[in-house]
Amino acid sequence: MTIEPATGEASAIRKTGRVEAIDLARAIALLAMAHYHLIWDLESFGYLDPGTAGSGWPKFYARCIAATFLFLVGFSLVLAHWPVVRPRKFLERLAMVVGAAVLVSLGTYIAFPDVFVFYGILHSIAVSSIAALLFLRLPPLITLIAGAAAVALPIYYFSSAFDVPWLFWTGLSESLPHSLDFVPFFPWFGPVLIGIAAGRLAKSSGLIGRMAQWRPGQSPQWKTLLRPFDFIGRHSLAFYLLHQPVLIALVWSLSQIMPPDRTEAYLSSCRQGCIANQEAAMCDRFCACTAERLAEQGKLDAVQSGRINPEDDPEIMEMARMCTASALSD
């Protein structure tokens, strides 16, 4: 026997076709993602130290954002396709996500061929959505256990057998591929399954019905404040595709008006490359010398941003030899 949603829940959802609490949560996650990408862009343009976005709290922040997105994917699948899967609605949404993922791959391949996005968050959402259909009707406890297992699997099992390009997407390889955005199936299928389990429990407890009846911002002031969140939550895919080009354009414009001081970034990267083969004190002297000379020549920004390859510039190579001799003699 098919179990239908409670009358109050179904009525509340039918009025708008949305659960506003989920749209709000999705909008907050999207804005957090945009904030993280701004950190990444500022680092790329030299306003933050190298490695800022990929270490410490920003790294943890990014993982929390990705987990939130994928949890909402699982939760939303329950809202849309339980107890009855709607094939047409599912395929239409899947086609949009796959199309957007292809655009991201093509765009990043043109701009950054060495680190293009071949399996990012959109690719992960598409594949996980298909796999998640197998768990929609299972008991929530089983789905929750499967989700925890998916998160734990790559911690305890990985193999060189997966170190081939066509298996990198699994997340079980010993070496990780270089990519601007890599969200492999394991462990990231886990949050989707946990979202499904949470959605099923929310359905059975009547929480979905209460969420569907919740209307934030009844006063005009609150409605004005929450309107942008509502818009972003309802148009999440468009926001995802457009926000990063807009942010890059803004940071690039800032760099034309207020160019970053790349001295500290250069010194940090120079020391990292030098200290593997030389003493730390010698590296400090060498890097300080080359930074000063590059600044005098007006080439520091171009070298640090990658517009100039030092090995292709005879003046820079001669300067490096002079700074090496000076650092060693000191």
Image (tube, grey):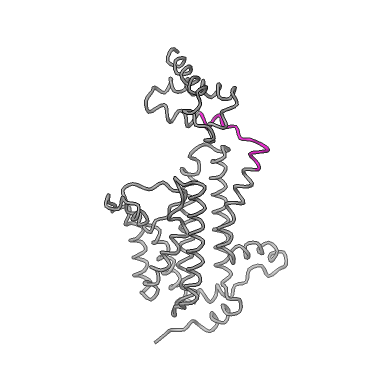
Q: Residue furthest right?
A: 220
Q: Please tell me whether residue 262 belongs to the stretch shown in magenta.
A: yes
Q: Residue furthest bottom?
A: 1
Nearest to the observer: residue 322 or residue 113:
113
Nearest to the observer: residue 176 or residue 3:
176
Q: Is residue 214 above or below residue 11?
A: above
Q: Please tell me whether residue 222 belongs to the stretch shown in magenta.
A: no
Q: Residue furthest top?
A: 329
User: What count of labels does the image hold?
Assistant: 0
Q: Position of residue 278 (x, y in %)?
A: 38, 23
Q: Quadrant of the C terminus?
A: top left
Q: Is residue 61 visible?
A: no
Q: Is residue 314 above or below residue 78?
A: above
Nearest to the observer: residue 326 or residue 111:
111
Q: Position of residue 228 (x, y in %)?
A: 65, 62
Q: Quadrant of the N terminus?
A: bottom left
129 relative position to 18: left or right: left
Q: Position of residue 207 (x, y in %)?
A: 50, 74
Q: Is residue 233 visible?
A: yes
Nearest to the observer: residue 113 or residue 275:
113
Residue drawn at the location 61% of the way across and 76% of the way down: 16
**Secondary structure mostly taken by the magenta-highlighted segment of the chain:** helix
On the image, which quarter does residue 307 sit in? top right
Residue drawn at the location 66% of the way across and 67% of the way down: 217
212 relative position to 285: left or right: right
Residue drawn at the location 48% of the way across and 77% of the way down: 88
On the image, which quarter does residue 253 sit in? top right
Magenta-drawn segment = 253-266
Residue drawn at the location 31% of the way across and 57% of the way down: 153
Q: Is residue 197 above or below residue 124?
A: below
Q: Is residue 216 above or below residue 169?
A: below
Q: Position of residue 64 (x, y in %)?
A: 47, 54
